[in-house]
Image (cartoon, rainbow, N blue to C red):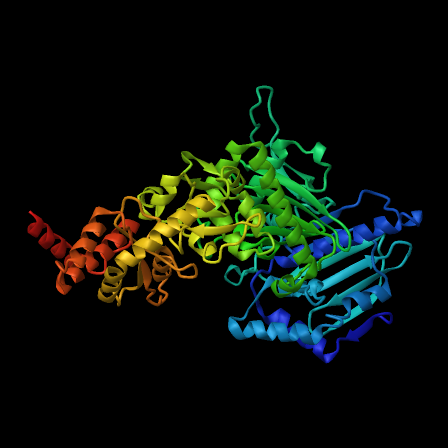
Amino acid sequence: MSATLERHVFQAETKEVLNLMVHSIYSNKDIFLRELISNSSDALDKRKFQALTDSSLGASDESHILLITDNDKKTLIVEDNGIGMNHDDLVQVLGTIAKSGTKEFMGALKEAQKTDSILPPELIGQFGVGFYSTFIVADKVTVESRKAGDEQGWKWESTGDGSFTIEPVQKDSVGTRVILQLKKVDQEDGMQDYTSEWTLKSIVKKYSDFVAYPIQMDIERTSPDYDDEGKAIEGSEKSTVERETLNSMKAIWLRPANEVTDEEYKEFYRHVSHDWNEPLTWFRTRMEGTFEAQALIYVPSKAPHDLYFRDSKRGIQLYVKRVFIMDECKELLPDYLRFMKGVVDSEDLNLNISREILQQSRQIRAIRSRLVKKTISTLEEMQQKNREQYLGFWKEFGRVMKEGIFEDHENKEALLNLALFQSTNSESEMTTLNEYIERMKPGQEKIYYASGEDRKQIENSPHLEAFKAKGYEVLLLTDPVDEMWTQRPPEFKSMNFQSVGKGAVELGTEEEKQAAEKELSEKKETYKSLLEAVQSKLSESVKEVRLSNRLTDSASCLVSNDNDMTPQMEQLLRSMNQEVPKTKRILELNPSHPLIEKLQTAFGNQAVDSSKLEDYSYLLYNQALLAEGSPLPEPGKFSKLLSSLLVGII
């Protein structure tokens, strides 16, 4: 042993951390190269920054990160000409694992091992242990470094056994060289050949493509000489070595917007989304203040086939200082914007931020809030300036956008402003709520809507009869998600939503409302006994039988109280295997319908006995169910009873 060789022993806890990492089954061993490249990028940044005030630290040649492989020796070297490290730096930076987080890291490792012994990549670096991911792929790690401004170089070396050595070394240039003595290739264990050109290129492309410095590698190529006719000369093959740059360094979100062409934006969209359809639009935003981040976000033109699948890919790519962190950062956008694609690049987040920290991060919440508002404003602009394009967007993503109305309290009115609806105003054109309000009748105070499986079913509903007769526009809601947000409908511009199938209906001017109420009140006295008798026959099915001012053509309909579930909502919950308590609804009868008038006359003359009244009541109730599209509880009984009554008439 050289007299200048120093041996340092890690503390007991640190040794245990390293032992756990080295011997654990790691879910993504490739992550070590990202860590080393990121460290090199930081070192180059530091040298460039310090050179601003000390010109002697400036790089004598172009800043770079170099990968050097030796397949025979099974070594991989990652070299940079950054700021470098001296003796004390090596002891402090590489000699102390997880400075203040050793216990926490050990706890996280052990907790992960309790489940399936697969350690998630985000644990690496979370507690300051990024460099030590090298021991997952290497039996020995050697670091040779010379700090800018120093003449002496130093070598740090460890086999991951809990100790390391430091000694002087002759190093001609400033920077750091990390030499990995690689473990044997084991594909089953995820241990790839990290001397392979293809393997290194693919890892760099995935994790470090946008690092600002060239990541280079010497590539050996064999090529023949050619004759005058351009044909290869047999036996003339010769080998040449060319230095290639593996990363694009094209972080287009960092380039001035006016220097990036539409084609470049579209090409980058294909890169991040793997979608060969062109994006509908995109936007960039820069966040400054207490934190710094930049984003390039795309709105796709077509919905993916798995948009509504629980396990579908969703989320924005997250970068930290142009280093790829994760592909699906779901915390950056709410679930109703899960179709959006793009990247967020933060200057302040930790390189290996974990899912748990993401959920608690104030910066992530601030970025999310900014992205949501920018997305909404981008869609608002599209809606106002290019209605045809926006109609295409809404056709693809309208249903998922509506999820935000009941999920995102802060932005619910803005989302309602974006929504498009079918309505009774037009057979083909959709309407916004603002357009609906502009067409409202004088004195109208509510936004009326009807829900059902499809437009045809809703238009045939008896609930719409009075609205059609008086010329009131009604929104037609046919998406299952509509049943969710209309359960507790929000206000829009201080106006309430009102289902045409709930509560009482009051249409027209004040004078017309008063006149209608007076007429209905008078008829209530006339029909009082009949209503009580019908209610007694249907006591197990309805909670009230009353006269209706919403019917003009139909004899009966079923309505709910304002806070009751709709039949569509009940069916939706049952389809999700949820228990739904039986809700009794209100049966409304049309006092002007010939059937109800004849029934009243017969009942008043005692021409209808109790049995017949029960049959008629049953028919009126089931007729109301059919009219709204609900299934009959006993279709066979209804059919026999109807046939029997028809025979009596004929």
Residue at (54% x, 75% y) in the render = 114
Q: Where is residue 129 in the image (x, y as percent from the top left)?
A: 70, 66
Q: Which of 362 and 606 is in front in this view?
A: 606
Q: Which of 84 and 552 is in front in this view?
A: 552
Q: Position of residue 131 (x, y in %)?
A: 71, 62
Tell me if residue 200 can be seen: no
- Left or right: 6 as drawn, with respect to 608: right
Q: Position of residue 382 (x, y in %)?
A: 58, 36
- Left or right: 318 as drawn, with respect to 497: right
Residue at (83% x, 70% y) in the render = 5
Q: Which of 383 and 636 is in front in this view?
A: 636
Report the number of numbered marks: 0
Tell me if residue 636 can be seen: yes
- Left or right: 618 as drawn, with respect to 110: left
**Residue 408 lies in quadrant:** bottom right
Residue at (72% x, 42% y) in the render = 254
Which quarter of the rendered picture does the N terminus lie within?
A: bottom right
Q: Position of residue 334 (x, y in %)?
A: 57, 54
- Left or right: 513 as drawn, with respect to 545: right
Judged from this view, the residue extending furthest toward the bottom is: 12
Residue at (10% x, 50% y) in the render = 646
Q: Is residue 39 above or below residue 237?
A: below
